[in-house]
Image (cartoon, rainbow, N blue to C red):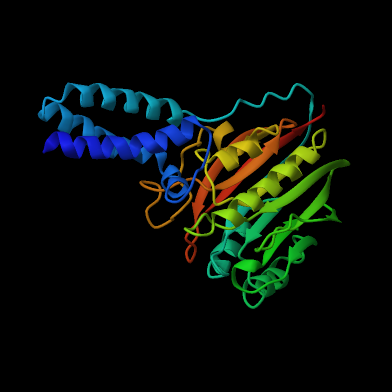
Amino acid sequence: MSAWFAGLLLAAVSVLVGCRIADTDAVTPVPQLLAFLPWLLVPTGTGLLLALLGRWWVGVVWGVVVLAGLAWFIEPYGKDSEPSGPAVASFRVLTSNTQFGRATGALLAAVRQQRPDVVFVQECDNRRCDIALRRELAVAYPYRQSVDGAGSQGSVILSRFPLEPAPGVPAAMGMPGAVADVHGHAVRLQLAHPMPPVPGGLGPWRRELERLRDFAAAGRGTPTIIAGDFNASQDHAAFRRILDTGLYDAARLAGHDRAPSWPSRTTPVFGVQIDHVLLTGDFSVTRARFLTLTGSDHRALVTDVTLHRR
């Protein structure tokens, strides 16, 4: 009986590891489970233990191989950013999903405390969040680019730097874009908030992540920041394809590549990092930290970045 349960557990995890090796998100429930890839160590370890107890030596070898595969893929994805040019500007970026505007008060407190220079806000509804940001932050952040909408559809970019409007990435939820003048240097800004990979909704999730990838690829040669709730982790092939255009994950550069940002109720013990600040190789990162905001199911991410001349 123990060998039977061991085989069942190892087979399930092997399918997921196989999809990771094949660089595909496949179909439900693969992308949902891949988000929690490090936690697959639990069923794998259980399967290995059951195989040992049942003296099923084929299962023992199988379990060791699966464990090795998981250990390999748990390592951070991507390379380190090593800008060679001189530093020309340092500033702070904050991204936060306010969960339908419920965390607006906590976000305002975090902005006053952290004093970021650029703020990306997802799920900034037009009844509560957007009104509060206009009222409380208009002086400190005179420049904005937004998509007006109710519930999860509203999104805002706030900036101390002058902004030029730019076409946002088309999506069901607002993903505005802009070009910031950072001390005379143009920096493309794009808010990310694709649809989540819910069962039956993988198509929109893939399409919107692909559009973000196309946006990143189209701007090669220009400093770019894409920040927000990607609803994807480094264990999703669709997200890795965005990184493969030449972007770097700020949290990964700061040594927090596996720090979970969702769901906030179980972080930092359990969760997945789906909130990111992605940067081109023009930037270095000196610090990144996650903040818990009362009212949101996501933790906010604050990063200190430095722009370098190419």
Horizontally, residue 173 falls left or right of residue 89, namely left
| The N terminus: image quadrant | top left
Total labels drawn: 0
Horizontally, residue 301 falls left or right of residue 59, namely right
Taking 115 as reference, is 149 above or below it? below
Taking 264 as reference, is 310 above or below it? above
Where residue 109 sits, quadrant-wise, is bottom right
Where residue 238 sits, quadrant-wise, is top right
197, 283: nearer the viewer: 197
| The C terminus: image quadrant | top right
23, 169: nearer the viewer: 23
Q: Residue at x 18, y 21 (%)?
A: 57
Q: Residue at x 50, y 31 (%)?
A: 22
Q: Residue at x 85, y 53 (%)?
A: 162
Question: Residue extending furthest bottom?
Answer: 127
Q: Residue at x 77, y 56 (%)?
A: 168
Residue 86, can we see it? Answer: yes
Q: Whole-percent x and y of residue 227?
A: 65, 48
Q: Whole-percent x and y of residue 110?
A: 57, 58
Q: Whole-percent x and y of residue 89?
A: 78, 37
Q: Whole-percent x and y of residue 277?
A: 63, 44
Taking 181 as reference, is 73 above or below it? above
Residue 249, can we see it? Answer: no
Taking 135 as reference, is 220 above or below it? above
